[in-house]
Amino acid sequence: MERKITIEEKEVYHEDYQMRMLQVNHVEGLLEIKGRGADGKSYYDYNVSGKVSLGVLYERNVISGNDIRNFLRGLLAVVGETKRYLLDINRILLKPEYIYYESGEYYFCYYPPGKENLWDEFHTLTEYFVKRADYKDQECVQMVFFLHKETMEENYSLEKVARHCLKEGGEEKEAEKTAPGSGALEDNYVDEDIYEYDKTEHDWIAEQETGSLIMEETENMWTPVKRFLTKHRRPKWGNWDGLYIEEEEL
């Protein structure tokens, strides 16, 4: 029995090179996708059978440090695979409802009409991590604080901030892959050279007109985190426009 989600785009469907590339190749880490057109609109169907979205997975659960490291490894791997197939990494959706988990692996929706910026989207995702973090897990608190802080920097390197967290968590040690929260990881190979950041293309912070407001809101959001870190004396760590989602079982 197949289970899917559908994203609707109010534009005529065009099967470009991205869809053709995805149809003839299996890109590791991307959900299986099918595109179709009807009534002047485009529909993109994703097979999510046997998988659960992050939005559901952490609706009533907290995120541990191990969960975040496991996710970061999956993200680096899928970005590498996407670039290897000459696909635009900015079309990878990083909202919790579009990221799926199954048996220790993370799967991402690749959305051809997407107009978002991967670096912007990842920073927004770190805000979700802040809200769902396990504040009893000191390592997790340190990690989400670091990710959120570093991704506010101009022209930050996604690879560097992710690898910093993996290194701090002892990622170089061999570990067995398990479900979220269990404390073990699997090893994935990622080519470091493919993540060189294009400062000109992705200089998004300079274009933001509401920077001061964002900083003010972020400061308020991080008040409990700073209190936590102060208490434990660890000073070292220092839109989508309402897309329609349809989920059904066939």
Image (spheres, grey):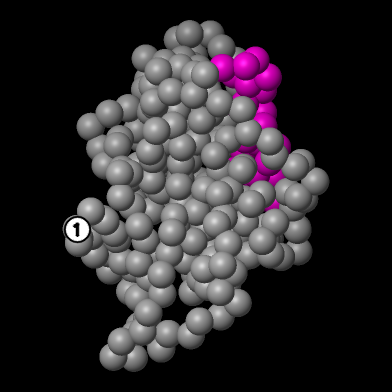
Q: Mark yes or no: residue 168 visible.
A: no
Q: Residue at x 39, y 40 (%)?
A: 101
Residue 180 image-quadrant placement = top left
Q: Residue at x 27, y 29 (%)?
A: 61
Q: Residue at x 32, y 27 (%)?
A: 62
Q: Above or below — where is 2 with respect to 132?
A: below
User: Horizontal and vertical percent for residue 176?
Assistant: 52, 19
Of the pair 237 and 87, the residue shown nearer to us: 87
- How many numbered marks are there? 1
Residue 236 image-quadrant placement = top right
Chain part drawn in magenta: 150-175
**Residue under numbered circle 1:** 249
Of the pair 7 and 241, the residue shown nearer to us: 7
Q: Is residue 73 left or right of residue 36?
A: right
Q: Secondary structure at mark 1?
A: strand
Q: Above or below — where is 50 with respect to 172?
A: below
User: Horizontal and vertical percent for residue 16?
Assistant: 56, 80
Q: Is residue 41 left or right of residue 233?
A: left
Residue 158 included in the magenta stretch of the image? yes
User: Horizontal and vertical percent for residue 233?
Assistant: 53, 8
Quadrant where the C terminus lies?
Answer: bottom left
Q: Residues within 10 Å of mark 1 (few under 14, many from 20)?
A: few
Q: Is residue 125 left or right of residue 16?
A: left
